[in-house]
Amino acid sequence: MNTHFRPPNLVLATIGLSLATFMQVLDTTIANVSLPTIAGNLGVSQDQSTWVITSFAVSNAIALPLTGFLTRRFGEVKLFMWATVLFSMASFLCGIAQSMSMLIVFRTIQGAVAGPMYPITQALLISIYPPAKRSMALALLAMVTVVAPIAGPILGGWITDNYSWPWIFFINVPIGIFASMVVGNQMRLREVVTQRPKIDYVGLITLVVGVGALQVVLDKGNDEDWFNSTFIIITAIISAIAIVIFLIWELTDKDPIVDLKLFRHRNFRMGTIALVLAYASFFAIGLLVPQWLQLNLGYTATWAGFATAPLGVLPVLLTFIVGKYATRFDLRLLTSGAFVVMGITCFLRSDFYIGIDFEHVALVQLLQGLGVAFFFMPVTTILLSDLQPHEIAAGGGLATFLRTVGASFSASLTTFLWQHRGILHHAQLTEQITPYNPTVQQAMSQTSDSQTAMAMLNQTITLQGLQISFNEVFHMLGWVFLSLIVVIWMAKPPFAAKASASAGGH
């Protein structure tokens, strides 16, 4: 492969690559604030609507480890173009979906073809920039991947309120076509070396079955009453068997589809644990806060987007500074600081209440952005720091794969916890609500329609139950962030050796 290739217009090539990444990362969050609307329009429960998020996350996770194989088979430029075009087509199909089942199928396809897009964009940017400017190119990519999840809820909310939810998917079509045409044109003279590598079918099939079945257990467990359901028990057994076979096979196969032996490296092991758990908690915040704003506080999708948006301000302002100067410090200190800030914001949210104002919600989001700015690049640099040069691509793919699966599990588990604990608190709060309770009698006497009064009282109790549950979930997330400080200090310097190759990788 010609590593000295320069596209005719470097700026145009960078814009094309960055736009595709922006579009793909945007789609991980753009549907978050639209879930209540989508659920209502397609006639499903709030619980079922989270499949829109998790179906994308799981198929995306399954596709990620295949990036290396697909790159060797088709070449980076061709893989990028096909993935981007297919992503646009899948987005169009999501927009015309007539039922939740159709939408989930198309979101699954969308997630699968999106899998290779980020790693390929990173690889192409590294290859077209001279070594001295690579860190700035990767810092730009890092900024795009921080801004896109923030823009998602605002854009998604505005489109949902002013047009209709299918347009959150339709806007991808022109962007994807433009990006693939620009990159294809700029890279057409780039030398391509392809090969026909052996595909690890056992690893691939057990990966798909194991992760897919586990996700079904997590997503359907709540609806099916967990292990009181034969369906859940059978699916859980299938998942467990497939994952055990996958682990044994991948650890013993000569050319595994996922190289699990990378975990022999201490920094990779500890850095990946910290990345997966911190990102899963971060993802939970991004999923719960917009839903809470709409269900408990009555915000529109647009205002929910505006309330969560300040999260992106500090990462945008600080990304280039972090990329340029972070490696002068002990990265464990920077990461610990990030976890402390993110933990504090979770504890602050654990004191939120139904009458809280917009400014308080937005200021906590703004403060969390300080943690986000010092989280991605240092953690990624730590986890890649003790890998051999030929292991970096596989290590980055494996860490991203586990991070994506972690986010998917987090979406299922935190939604379940929030709703399950909300029901529990509702039951506890209603224990004292009887016609003989003097306080209840007084409340009832203020309206002539006792049925309406009871309905309003029940609605108030439901919201209070969900609020207590919301506070509990965030209290738990706060302790998760603080406990990860211990994990990150188990990594050992030096971390700076490969910093220039990893600064943008998240």
Image: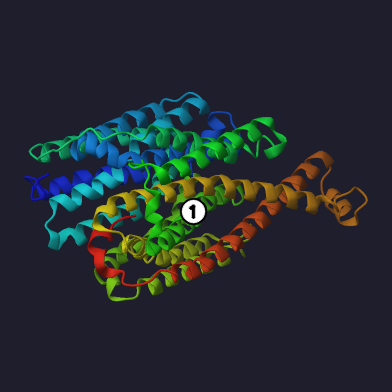
Against 476, residue 451 (above or below) is above
Q: Say what amino acid the circle numbered 1 marks.
A: Ala
Q: Is residue 314 visible?
A: no
Residue 15: where, in percent of width, then height?
Answer: 19, 47
Q: What residue is pinned by disc 1?
A: 280
* Residue 487 at x, y percent in the picture: 48, 67
Crowding near pointer 1: few (<14 within 10 Å), some, many (20+)? Answer: many
Q: Residue furthest top?
A: 98
Could you tell me residue 349's position as x and y percent? 57, 63
Q: Residue at x 21, y 36 (%)?
A: 180
Place of residue 461 in the rendered image (x, y in percent of width and height, measured from the top left): 74, 50
Where is the C terminus found, in terms of image quarters? bottom left
Question: Dividing the picture into quarters, in which one does residue 270 lie?
Answer: bottom left
Along the line of sight, which residue is nearer the eye, 27 or 399? Answer: 399
Q: How many marks?
A: 1
The residue lying toward the viewer, choosing from 88 and 299, is: 88
Describe the element under mark 1 as helix, strand or loop.
Answer: helix
Name the one closer to the observer, 336 or 491: 491
Q: Quadrant of the N terminus?
A: top left
- What's the residue at 36%, 45% (across, down)? 26
